[in-house]
């Protein structure tokens, strides 16, 4: 199948919707379709397509002419097609042509008075697909008058000559290839860097080496179709339709519907075969993690923090009861079961951070805690118990992406960078840290402080800069996977979304009750399209990232919800920790009727 729906060999198609009666073009000639396609043959006899019946020599000619005249007459009587209607016909024609239904295309074009593409474009397409490069180059002169940007001719000529050069090289015609390079490509004085790269291909010892180095499919239909796709970008759609235009529009429509779907939480499949075009896309709320799947009651006091591991296989929960519990996530049922308990955190556990490879877990305590615990999760052994001074307050921690260092700090002015054994590598004096985050570059550390701001600190060159400034205390914050967005829980204000690159407040999410408790919100769902936060009104709130109003309010907890964590691998799994001493695990509705289940699988 050729690009833009072109058929095989000599098959071609005309474009640009014009009334055939008005432009005076004949509807068909000999064995050729009226849209420029060659007609098929049956046992060597030409099969006419202008009216679906064969036209024998000397027979029925006048009748055919009369029929043709009456068709033109009836066409003139018809209401002239609007531009949108003509465009739709051309799109349908291109799609049918791509399926090989050339006679159907011919009949559609003939009856509608449209043509698929400009005759010059048809000729150009055929010459490109047949590798007749000199003729294709001459065709560009005819197309020049039809183009909005005459400068594009040079770019198109460069693409043609590049293909010609590569095909000569593959065929072992090195002298001819060299002549193209020196006598045709270089005089264009266009993209000299690329010409230097092309000249290097002369050193390729065999065809496979050339195809590998040039990242090129080789001489044939595939590479020429790809070339046509590039060439068509320089031609107006009135001359030649962009390749597979109808499929592109349908795919965009499906993606837009998914984008507007509040509860869409699965991977976007760009393949049109995976969806039905006969129905609008819609996801049910029952497919969203709004329903309690489990209530974990093993903690015997307030649960202050919860966090899924980076690989999504474990959940860590920290409590005022001085323990950290590690839970194993069943990959099939998504049920959680207790894996091990880590004990001895005298002040309780208010913050947890998994190492990038999930081997280690760091636990921090509340404001009056000067200690930090670094656990080996796999063995359950305490690797490091760190305390620089009894005066310290180590309440927050963040791992460097290399997994060999971490930063920690608190509200009493401590801000340290340490190795896995708790050895102090660097420190920053006088920063009263509320919350920390290491960016993906491994150099910058974000820290919210008691001045209602987030600043960026670089431990390598000892520079710092202001990034976010709020009017109220920032109780906690988290950063999206791509490092672009920050989600802040702001005292008395609620949840705010900031763009760290542009340093602007993007959105304020409504509904949540936030006083001066430390509440941890999170990004979540597929592509991190959703935001979830706990609240002092005992609820969990979920928003779509683009909307300020919550799309779900989850009830069940009986006291403040301190933390919410969304599984980074399983988009339909979420956990929340509360002062009521429980951890709730949220997922889709346990029972979907057959129609909804089909929708879940299909969408």
Image (cartoon, rainbow, N blue to C red):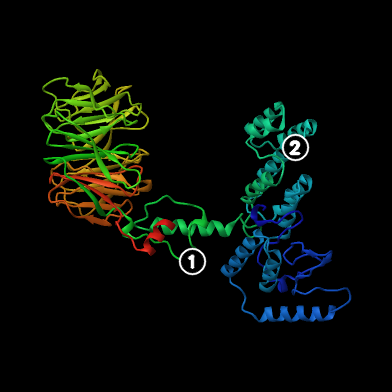
Q: Is residue 558 above or below residue 434?
A: below
Q: Position of residue 463 (x, y in %)?
A: 30, 25
What's the mark number on residue 278? 1
- Between disc 2 and disc 1, whose residue precedes? 2
Q: Is residue 436 visible?
A: no
Q: Are marks 2 and 1 in contact (CB under 8 Å)?
A: no
Q: Nearer the viewer, mark 2 or mark 1?
A: 1
Give the residue drawn at x 44%, y 51%: 268
- The reply, left or right, for residue 435 in relation to residue 256 is left
Q: The residue tagged with tag 2: helix, strand or loop?
A: helix
What's the mark number on residue 184? 2
Give the camera-side residue of 437 and 267: 267
Give the residue drawn at x 56%, y 58%: 247
Q: The residue tagged with tag 1: helix, strand or loop?
A: loop
How many numbered tags mark residues here? Answer: 2
Give the camera-side residue of 308 and 439: 308
Give the residue drawn at x 75%, y 55%: 123
Q: Position of residue 413 (x, y in %)?
A: 16, 26
Estimate how packed mark 2 is, as few (under 14), some (14 to 19) or many (20 or more) residues with alpha carbons within 10 Å: some
Q: Position of residue 391 (x, y in %)?
A: 11, 23
Q: Position of residue 1 (x, y in %)?
A: 67, 53
Estimate how packed mark 1 is, as few (under 14), some (14 to 19) or many (20 or more) residues with alpha carbons within 10 Å: few
């Amino acid at each position: 199948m050729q690009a833009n729906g072109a058929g095989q060999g000599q098959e071609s198609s005309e474009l640009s919707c014009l009334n055939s009666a008005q432009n005076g073009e004949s509807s068909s000639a000999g064995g050729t379709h009226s849209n420029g396609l060659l007609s098929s043959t049956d046992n060597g006899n030409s099969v006419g397509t202008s009216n679906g019946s064969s036209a024998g020599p000397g027979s029925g000619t006048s009748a055919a002419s009369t029929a043709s005249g009456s068709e033109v007459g009836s066409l003139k009587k018809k209401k002239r097609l609007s531009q949108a209607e003509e465009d739709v016909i051309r799109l349908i024609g291109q799609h049918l042509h791509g399926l090989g239904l050339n006679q159907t295309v011919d009949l559609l074009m003939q009856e509608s008075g449209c043509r698929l593409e400009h005759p010059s474009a048809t000729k150009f397409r055929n010459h490109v697909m047949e590798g007749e490069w000199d003729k294709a180059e001459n065709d560009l002169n005819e197309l020049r008058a039809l183009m909005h940007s005459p400068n594009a001719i040079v770019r198109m000529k460069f693409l043609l000559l590049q293909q010609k050069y590569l095909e000569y090289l593959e065929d072992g015609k090195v002298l001819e290839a060299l002549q193209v390079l020196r006598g045709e490509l270089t005089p264009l004085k266009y993209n000299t860097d690329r010409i230097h790269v092309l000249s290097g291909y002369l050193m390729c010892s065999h065809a496979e080496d050339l195809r590998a180095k040039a990242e090129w499919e080789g001489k044939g239909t595939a590479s020429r179709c790809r070339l046509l796709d590039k060439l068509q970008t320089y031609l107006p759609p009135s001359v030649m339709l962009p390749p597979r235009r109808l499929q592109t529009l349908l795919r965009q429509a499906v993606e837009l519907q998914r984008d507007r779907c509040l509860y869409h939480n699965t991977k976007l499949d760009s393949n049109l075969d995976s969806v039905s075009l006969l129905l609008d896309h819609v996801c049910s709320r029952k497919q969203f993690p709004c329903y309690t799947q489990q209530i974990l009651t093993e903690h015997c006091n307030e649960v202050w923090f919860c966090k899924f591991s980076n690989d999504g296989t474990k959940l860590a929960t920290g409590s005022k009861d001085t323990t950290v519990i590690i839970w194993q996530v069943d990959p099939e049922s998504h049920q959680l079961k207790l894996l091990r308990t880590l004990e001895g955190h005298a002040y309780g556990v208010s913050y947890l951070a998994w190492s990038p490879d999930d081997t280690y877990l760091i636990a921090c305590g509340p404001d009056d805690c000067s200690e930090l615990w670094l656990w080996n999760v796999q063995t359950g052994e305490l690797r490091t118990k760190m305390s620089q001074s009894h005066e310290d307050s180590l309440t927050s921690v963040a791992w460097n992406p290399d997994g060999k260092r971490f930063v920690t700090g608190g509200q009493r002015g401590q801000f340290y960078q340490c190795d896995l054994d708790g050895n102090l590598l660097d420190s920053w004096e006088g920063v009263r840290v509320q919350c920390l985050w290491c960016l993906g570059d491994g150099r910058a550390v974000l820290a919210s402080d008691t001045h209602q701001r987030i600043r960026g600190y670089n431990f390598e060159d000892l520079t710092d800069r202001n990034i976010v400034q709020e009017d109220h205390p920032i109780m906690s914050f988290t950063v999206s996977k791509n490092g672009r967005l920050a989600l802040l829980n702001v005292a008395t204000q609620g949840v705010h979304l900031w763009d760290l690159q542009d340093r602007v407040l993007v959105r304020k999410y409504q509904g949540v009750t936030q006083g001066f408790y430390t509440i941890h919100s999170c990004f979540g769902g597929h592509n991190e399209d959703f935001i979830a936060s706990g609240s002092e009104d005992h609820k969990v709130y979920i928003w779509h990232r683009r909307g300020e109003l919550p799309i779900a309010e989850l009830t069940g907890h009986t006291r403040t919800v301190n933390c919410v964590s969304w599984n980074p691998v399983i988009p339909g799994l979420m956990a929340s920790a509360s002062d009521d001493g429980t951890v709730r695990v949220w997922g889709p509705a346990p029972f979907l009727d057959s129609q909804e289940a089909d929708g879940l699988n299909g969408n």
